Amino acid sequence: MKVLLIGSGGREHALAWKLAQSPKLTTLYAAPGNPGIAEEATIVSLDTEDNAAVVSFCKQEGIDFVVVGPEAPLVAGLADALRDAGIAVFGPSAAAAQLEGSKGFTKDICAKYGIPTGAYQRFTAAEPAKAYVREQGAPIVIKADGLAAGKGVTVAMTLDEALDAIDACFSGTFGAAGAEVVVEAFLDGEEASFFCLCDGVNALPLASAQDHKRVGDGDTGPNTGGMGAYSPAPVMTAEMTERTMKDIIEPTIRGMAESGHPFQGVLFAGLMITAKGPELIEYNVRFGDPECQVLMMRMRSDLLPILYAAATGGLDKLTAEWRPDAALTVVMASNGYPGSYEKNTPIDALPGEDAATKVFHAGTALKDGKLVATGGRVLNVTAMGATVSAAKDTAYAAVDRVRWENGFCRRDIGWQAVAREKS
């Protein structure tokens, strides 16, 4: 099977690495790719924001299947363009991608189909939003409605913080994403990420993970795209997984089909495990980044036929097998991230890799034959272990072998699971 992978981050490197292991694969192309992805795939020069150009390339090269990594092309209708051209594609239609593209859309789906989530209101102007916040009090959550690269959410612990967040959205900090704001109730509990493949009718549960959004140790500082993750998340017990499928995933799939937007792709449910059980914080319509990295390390099954079934139907006939070991990834980011940072800083050495350790490239490039950091989140140092504690120790040992003067990382990834294992 000839496959084209769209994307250039750590998530896409993990997908490329896993797809490349499939006996069903004949050729793997990637665009725009990165130096890590280039070790697994043929990088092609292709404007991935130009849907017609992507379709044209696929026809020209006889591509059998397209795997779309990031959310922006999905929200922009790339999957629709490919399906219209008769090309199988992993990823939802633009209409179904609203589950990530519009937080208000998702909250409305939850309200209509009785999916447990925090109470909310939608606003298109600052003053009514502020009045609602004053009435509700803090803590409270302020969300830019649209895509904001993981940075449009403020969990405001004080009233002033909430009011400032509303101003930030409507003043253009998040561009068009902040033209509408969703204000929702603060949910108290432990967060978890849960992943499930869907073919429009059937759902295949994958695995759980836990992400670390804050930039600093002890979950301090501003939110980022994610500073590390581990899988599985101990809080997602068999009972919690069953409830998540029954109360959240399955009603969503039914609701999307009834709404005329059947969902095909991966549903990434950001959950809060509260005293009442699992409640939905938000949906994403692609694999998490960096959660994908730990999922791919743990997945024993061939990824390619599972993704193809999500795109073409028949997921009910497949299962996904997982290694019992834990996986943990540490994100190495450029100094200054998530604020401004210097680009093109040299990465002088990466650690050696083995069956238990893998470095996934995110914001990297080759300049004059040398590896440089071009993004905010740059490397995902990932390791396996019998426990989260063991995986953490192996991952940080590998981090300490990276020679990159402009990089930093959190030193406490996995702390909740590690504390559980020690108690």
Image: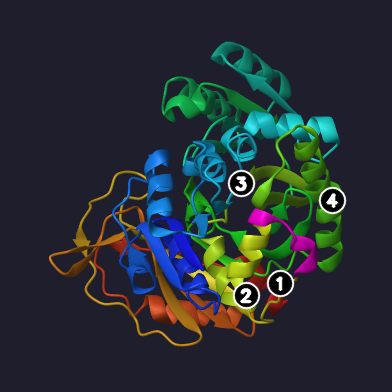
Colour basis: rainbow
Which residue is label 2 attached to?
Answer: 299
Q: Main secondary structure of the magenta part?
A: helix
Q: Give residue 320's mark.
A: 1
Q: Are marks 2 and 1 in contact (CB under 8 Å)?
A: yes
Reply above or below: 325 against 172.
below
Range drawn in magenta: 311-318
Tag 3 secondary structure: strand
Residues at discs 4 and 2 in contact (Cβ within 8 Å): no
Whole-number angstrom distance, CA of label 3 to CA of label 2: 20 Å
Crowd tier of the residue under label 3, counting other residues whose Cα lies within 10 Å: few below 14, some 14–19, many 20 or above: many
| Residues tagged 3 and 2 counted as in contact (Cβ below 8 A) | no
The kind of residue on which mark 1 rests is Ala
Which residue in the structure is indicated by mark 3? 284
Which of the two labelled residues, at mark 3 and mark 2, occupies the earlier sequence position? Answer: 3
Residue 275: numbered disc? 4
Near mark 2 (Cα within 10 A), the count class, few <14, some 14-19 or many ≥20, is: some
* Three-letter amino acid code at the position of disc 4: Ala
Amino acid under disc 2: Met
Q: Earlier in the sequence, mark 4 or mark 2?
A: 4
Query: Could you tell me how far apart the alpha carbons at marks 2 and 1 are, in whole angstroms?
Result: 8 Å
**Badge 1: residue crowd in 10 Å (few <14, some 14–19, many ≥20):** some
Report the side of 366 relative to 149 (left or right): left
Q: Is residue 233 visible?
A: yes
Q: Hey, what amino acid is under mark 3?
A: Asn
Left or right of 247: which side holds 218?
Answer: left
> Any magenta on residue 371?
no
User: Is label 4 in a helix, a strand or a loop?
Assistant: loop
Going from the N terminus, do you reach mark 2 or mark 1 first? Answer: 2
* Rendered residue at 69%/45% (across/down): 263
Q: Is residue 194 visible?
A: no
Circle 4 residues within 10 Å: few <14, some 14–19, many ≥20: few
